[in-house]
Amino acid sequence: MSAYAMDLPRDKEYFVDLHIGDPELVRLIRGDITKYHADAIVNAANSQLLPGGGVCGAIHQAGGVAIAEECARIRSERGPLSPGQAVATTAGRLDAKFVIHAVGPVWQGGNDGEPETLSGCYRESMRIADELKLSSIAFPAISTGIFGYPVEQAAWVAVSSVIEGLRFAKHLVFVSVVLFDKSSLDVFASAKTSRRPPVSGNPYKVSIGTM
């Protein structure tokens, strides 16, 4: 079935798979990223790499003090990160090998380079994961919390960025975008099932599964 003809399930849990290649896959799913299994889990970090609220606070709390200690060491060595940059640390107690801390843009209305910076977060995180020879990575919806990025606009940037990043990766084959609530999943899923995939010479197939 073509992606743009699909209806999203409304009465049950579901996930959306974007089949980029064989075995390259992007999955959109609702869940708790702190309990998700992947080689790397991405943290929606702040520039100081400090434990904060939202996803950032949850990852630090679930992963334990080892993550904050390594973040402090990185901060002391290189200073604060700029939006669009990312660094890797231990994953502590999380079911992952690494946490990749990516600093997203604060929404300023969309005319201050936010889409390019947000795309950079995803691409740089994937570059680091690929450099570490990891095969899977899980993202939250970066910048859509206290940084105020509108979810629908963030969805288009995020999914397009991970699709392109996966096509150029040497080791990564599985990218998950783990959304905290169903409304966010619906928005991300609609962004990829309500329209035709962009014509880029490398079309992908879309499927929807239920749980």
Image (cartoon, rainbow, N blue to C red):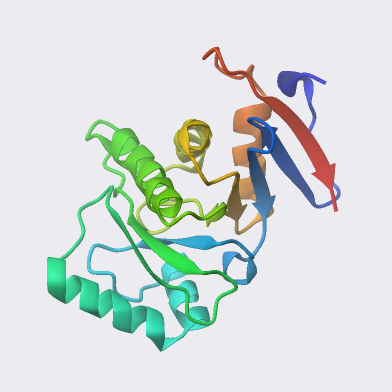
Q: Residue furthest bottom?
A: 65
Residue toward you, 172 or 80: 172
Quarter residue 190 falls in: top right
Q: Residue at x 29, y 48 (%)?
A: 105
In this rendering, does residue 142 appear at all? yes
Q: Judge whether 68 appears above or below 192 on screen.
A: below
Horizontal arrangement in the rendering, residue 177 relative to residue 99 (left or right): right
Horizontal arrangement in the rendering, residue 175 relative to residue 44 (left or right): right
Horizontal arrangement in the rendering, residue 130 relative to residue 112 (left or right): right
Q: Judge whether 185 appears above or below 161 on screen.
A: below
Count of numbered circles on the image: 0
Query: In the image, residue 26 lies at what x, y percent?
Result: 62, 41
Q: Judge whether 184 appears above or below 98 on screen.
A: above
Q: Residue at x 44, y 34 (%)?
A: 157
Quarter residue 48 falls in: bottom left
Query: In the image, residue 179 lies at what x, y percent?
Result: 60, 54
Q: Residue at x 60, y 50 (%)?
A: 176
In this rendering, does residue 109 appear at all? no
Q: Residue at x 52, y 46 (%)?
A: 171
Query: In the image, residue 87 lies at what x, y percent?
Result: 31, 61
Residue toward you, 70 or 80: 70
Query: In the image, residue 24 lies at what x, y percent?
Result: 63, 38
Can you say which quadrant of the picture contains the N terminus? top right
